[in-house]
Amino acid sequence: MKNLVIGATVLILSLGILYAGVGLEFGAPPFTDMDDYFVSHGQEQTGGNNIVTDIVFDFRGFDTLGEATVLFTAVLGAGLAFRKRREDEDYEYE
Amino acid sequence: MNMSKIVRSAANLLFPFILVFGFYIVLHGHLTPGGGFQGGAVIATGFVLMFVAYSYDFITGRIGAESLHTTETIGLVLFIVTALVAIVFGVTFFTNWMLDVGPVLNNPVAFGPNPGDLNTAGFIPVMNLAVGIEVLGALSVIVLYMLSGTKEEI
């Protein structure tokens, strides 16, 4: 009985999500104002020929700062997981 | 333990070319496809090639995880300090302040397709270099940490 209820719930939810997804129109209407601004003003405002680098390091510098911080935190986590343990340190594996 | 003589010779031969190619991607980040993250990943690939070809003891006797971690920290600090200097000139954090002061990295650039000039784009090349240094240290030191966890069995 319990399995039946769970199965019916999953079925109804998937059908609902599918129905909502099929009705969506992907990529329409196209938003091009931001693209046109970057392409037409990027070179004169930042001086770099590579528009992608202009956006990543100048227009969205804070985003790059966050990415660098994420990488730094990943290194800290790896160093914590693989650190040298003392002989008498008691730890347990899950 | 070391890999075979063939693998070590090939790694020795390829290592400088990988470094040069990675630094080319980093330094030309504002002109050609690529940038700090991509070039740093290429340079880290060269380091990982040496880690694979030689033994863990041989590698740690020469480079060490501490120095790689310091390299990564230097890159991140350089990135933040370059962004912070903008406050000295009275503009907001992360403003491209090198475009307003001095002739360094400040040549005028033409609109549209052009051959490109290395001496342009304000602080973007400096940021590319900082992020490249950080990524090469970070990815290398992650592989070195994982290699230390295998207890020298490969």
Image (cartoon, grey):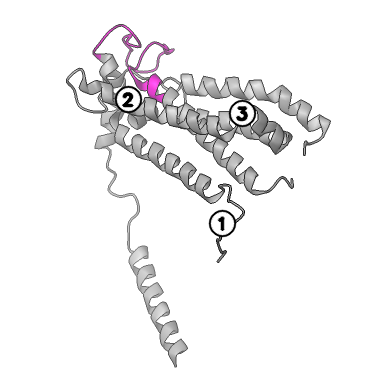
Q: Amino acid at mark 3?
A: Ile
The quadrant in which the C terminus of chain A is found is: bottom right
Secondary structure under the numbered disc 1 in the rendered image: loop
Q: Amino acid at mark 2?
A: Val
Density class for disc 1 (Cα within 10 Å; few <14, some 14-19, many ≥20) is few
Residue ID for mark 3: B63
The residues bearing labels 2 and 3 have C-alpha atoms spaced at a distance of 26 Å
Density class for disc 2 (Cα within 10 Å; few <14, some 14-19, many ≥20) is few
Q: Is residue A89 visible?
A: yes
Secondary structure under the numbered disc 3 in the rendered image: loop
Disc number placed over residue A89 in the picture, else none: 1
| Comes first in the chain, label 2 or label 3 | 3
Residue A14 in magenta stretch: no
User: Which of the 4 image quarters holds residue B50?
Assistant: top right
Disc number placed over residue B81 in the picture, else none: 2
Q: Residue at the location (73% across, 36% down)?
A: B55
Residues drawn in magenta? B100-128
Q: Amino acid at mark 1?
A: Glu
Q: Residue at the location (46% across, 43% down)?
A: A76
Residue A3 vertical position relative to residue B138 in the rendered view, above or below: below
